[in-house]
Image: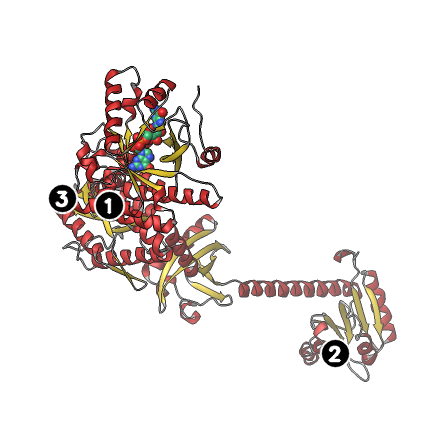
């Protein structure tokens, strides 16, 4: 381990050709705790100095050969000895030789005759001041390195803001050339407002003796630059101000803010910033006693674009929609007077295919409806995406401040509600929020929305209920019955959601899904070698009203590759009541392909057998409300017997549904009902369980 610095004795080299002087000097300095080495002339000294330099050199001037001046000059040329203090010992106490001693690089001189008692003190003093000078130099070097390494400008100022000194780190560009501000006051160099900020900081730092922080901006040739200055008192009358250009940091902060507050896809404000700004706008409107309208847009059919053309096409469409909205709003095409350019509030994308438009200073609902219609017309024009023309429409819900909500969140919620209502009324529609949208309507609207999502998220399942021959329980058919596994409400019965699906038109998509799933299920069973009976699928009247329903049935049959004779469509009586020639033709065409038709819940409607005859119906299903009363209820028994007899006379098959008891079965068997469906044989079951039953081929009723 190296001993601590203080513990080391300082070394001194004594150079003197006079033997006695050398000895006396050596004796004296040894007493002052120096470690001494000696040289008898200049040459010997130079030879000794090739090794480790001493801490101090005591050098006689007047020596034969190489004199003291020459030795001193040599020492100063050596980089490792440039700071070693040299005390020249001269007999010539004249100004000339003193000058020459200093010129040669001497640190001090002593004249002969030497005052011996003070030689040691003098040597120690010279050594100490040389060390201090070295430390100071090292400190300065360190400081200079720190300044160089910092990307800052450093100003030394007096307490009145006069620049006394200036340094700049690597890459720090002074905002004014250094010469322009040295010796001048801040207010003479910088714009008044900035000078004011700095002077206040300097004043506070000088008064409190504390670090002060100031920020300011300056207009530079390449744009606005942001600066942060830290002012620290450096003496009773001076302060140091370290200034950093934080423009890049500001830009990054802005970028982060944009990411947090703006939608990256469209560059529009996102939900967070929209709500923040809307609240401010509402505050302003309430002070000015003005109305504000919030239009909530949701694209109809956006999901279809995403599903069929892919997500990048969907993204492109959203950008195109955003672009069109921005452009028209900016051009004042939607409103006669320019909208909220300044607040940036006029347009936002809340996520997905939802956009908002805000109309401040509303002068009546007429303006809103006009804007809503213009928006719809604007979006209704086709978009070109990847060489294809795509048309989307928008449903718009409108809420008005302060009537429909006094803060951003409730206004948005009500505009959203109104938007659902608009969708419910048929797409491409706009609706004003109306308090009379009761909880019940809302629940129904929510259910519809959930249904739509359920379809997207594949929340539906099919159960299959066997239909058996009445005499021996052989499975002769399956009825596909839909179930909805709602993420929050659990399994929802079709009785609850089919009517909503019918009202909203969603039944068309759901119906397609049911038929496709049932056909695929049968095909997959067949692929394992299982013999399958035909599958009956419910069809509601609303489905038939849809464009080309029968065509889509044929398409699904073709697509899944199922044998058409394996498919049975269960129609309701109401379908028969509104026969159109075109539709009847379609039924006959499907029948010609092999598809079977039956009438569900027969006997509950008003259809007469004459209607039935016009359609290619093969089977009647006796509604379970009649079966329930069997065999005791005479009316039910009479109707059931009559339906069976009539069906037979028309050459139709009959199936009784909802058969739960042995007595009902016995009655139906006696009445010649060929087929049975009901809990007595089996409840509707999931595919794996039905597969087991199909492998057995028949189901025995309990005795
Ligand atoms: N009490 C009792 N009930 C029995 C018995 N056997 C069967 N059921 C139930 O009776 C209903 C028969 O179907 P539905 O009359 O076509 O009546 C169906 C049908 O009109 C409709 N539905 C079901 N699935 C679909 C579908 O995929 N599309 C359409 N459009 N409607 C469907 O929802 C209705 C109700 O379906 P589910 O709740 O599955 O109810 C089914 C079935 O589970 C029994 O022995 N006792």
User: Ligand 1 falls in which quarter?
Assistant: top left
Q: What element carries label 3?
A: helix
Whether residue 198 is visible:
no
Q: In this view, does 676 lie above or below 157?
A: above
Image quadrant containing the N terminus: bottom right
Q: Residues within 10 Å of mark 2 (few under 14, many from 20)?
A: some
221 sits to left or right of 380? right
Task: Residue 140: give x, y in percent of width and height.
Answer: 59, 64
Colour treatment of the image: secondary structure
Q: Distance between the residues labelled 3 and 1?
A: 52 Å
Q: Nearer the viewer, mark 1 or mark 2?
A: 1
637 sits to left or right of 370? right
Whether residue 264 is visible:
yes
Q: In this view, does 533 lie above or below 341?
A: above
Task: Choose the circle earlier in sequence order: 1 or 2.
Answer: 2
- Circles 1 and 2, Cβ within 8 Å, touching? The answer is no
Task: Residue 307: give x, y in percent of width and height.
Answer: 35, 52
Q: What element carries label 2?
A: loop
Mark 2 = which residue? 92
Q: Distance between the residues labelled 3 and 2?
A: 111 Å
Q: Is mark 1 on a helix, strand or loop?
A: helix
């Amino acid at each position: 381990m190296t001993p601590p610095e203080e513990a080391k004795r300082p070394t001194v080299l004594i150079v003197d050709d006079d033997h006695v002087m050398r000895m006396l000097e050596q004796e004296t300095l040894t007493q002052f705790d120096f470690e001494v080495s000696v040289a008898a002339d200049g040459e010997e000294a130079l030879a000794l100095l090739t090794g480790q330099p001493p801490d101090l050199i005591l050098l006689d001037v007047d020596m034969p050969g190489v004199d003291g001046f020459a030795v001193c000059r040599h020492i100063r040329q050596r980089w490792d000895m440039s700071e070693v203090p040299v005390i020249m010992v001269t007999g010539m106490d004249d100004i000339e030789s003193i000058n020459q001693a200093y010129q040669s690089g001497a640190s001090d001189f002593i004249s002969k005759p030497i005052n011996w008692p003070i030689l040691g003190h003098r040597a120690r003093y010279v050594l100490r001041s040389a060390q201090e000078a070295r430390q100071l130099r090292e400190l300065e070097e360190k400081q200079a390195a720190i300044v160089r390494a910092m990307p800052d400008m450093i100003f030394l100022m007096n307490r009145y803001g006069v620049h006394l000194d200036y340094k700049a780190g690597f890459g720090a560009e002074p905002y004014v050339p250094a010469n322009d501000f040295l010796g001048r006051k801040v207010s003479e160099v910088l714009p008044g407002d900035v000078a004011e900020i700095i002077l206040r900081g300097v004043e506070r730092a000088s008064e409190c003796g504390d670090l002060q922080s100031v920020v300011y901006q300056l207009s530079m040739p390449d744009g606005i630059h942001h600066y942060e200055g830290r002012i620290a008192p450096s003496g009773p009358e001076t302060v140091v101000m370290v200034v950093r250009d934080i423009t890049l940091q500001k830009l990054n902060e802005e970028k982060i803010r944009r990411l947090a507050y703006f939608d990256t896809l469209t560059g529009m404000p996102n939900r967070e910033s929209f709500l923040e700004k809307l609240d401010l706008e509402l505050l302003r409107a309430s002070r000015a006693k003005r109305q504000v309208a919030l239009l909530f847009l949701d694209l109809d059919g956006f999901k279809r674009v995403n599903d069929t053309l892919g997500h990048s096409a969907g993204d492109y469409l959203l950008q195109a929609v955003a672009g069109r909205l921005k452009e028209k709003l900016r051009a004042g095409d939607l409103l006669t007077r320019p909208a909220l350019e300044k607040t940036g509030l006029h347009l936002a994308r809340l996520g997905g295919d939802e956009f908002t438009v805000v109309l401040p200073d509303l002068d009546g609902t007429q303006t809103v409806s006009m804007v809503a219609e213009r928006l719809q017309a604007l979006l209704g024009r086709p978009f070109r995406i990847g060489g294809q023309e795509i048309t989307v429409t928008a449903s718009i819900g409108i809420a008005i401040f302060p009537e429909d909500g006094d803060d951003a969140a409730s206004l948005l919620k009500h505009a959203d509600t109104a938007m659902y209502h608009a969708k419910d009324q048929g797409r491409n529609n706009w609706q004003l929020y109306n308090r009379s949208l009761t909880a019940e309507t809302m629940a129904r609207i929510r259910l519809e929305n959930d249904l739509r999502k359920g379809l997207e998220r594949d929340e539906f399942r099919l159960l299959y209920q066997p239909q058996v021959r009445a005499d021996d329980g052989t499975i002769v058919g399956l009825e596909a019955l839909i179930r909805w596994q709602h993420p929050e409400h659990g399994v929802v019965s079709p009785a609850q959601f089919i009517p909503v699906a019918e009202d909203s038109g969603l039944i068309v998509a759901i119906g397609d899904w049911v038929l496709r799933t049932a056909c695929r299920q049968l095909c997959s069973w067949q692929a394992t070698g299982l013999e399958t009976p035909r599958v009956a699928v419910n069809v509601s009247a609303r489905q038939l009203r849809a464009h080309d329903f029968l065509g889509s049935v044929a398409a699904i049959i073709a697509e899944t590759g199922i044998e058409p004779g394996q498919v049975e469509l269960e129609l309701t009586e109401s379908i028969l009541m509104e026969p159109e020639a075109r539709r009847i033709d379609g039924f006959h065409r499907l029948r010609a392909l092999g598809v079977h038709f039956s009438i569900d819940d027969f006997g509950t409607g008003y259809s007469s057998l004459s209607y039935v005859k016009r359609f290619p119906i093969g089977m009647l299903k006796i509604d379970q409300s009649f079966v329930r009363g069997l065999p005791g209820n005479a009316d039910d028994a009479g109707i059931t017997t009559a339906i069976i007899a009539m069906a037979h006379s028309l050459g139709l098959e009959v199936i009784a549904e909802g058969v739960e008891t042995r007595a009902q079965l016995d009655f139906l068997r006696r009445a010649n009902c060929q087929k049975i469906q009901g809990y007595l044989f089996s409840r509707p079951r999931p595919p794996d369980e039905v597969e087991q039953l199909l492998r057995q081929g028949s189901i025995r009723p309990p005795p």
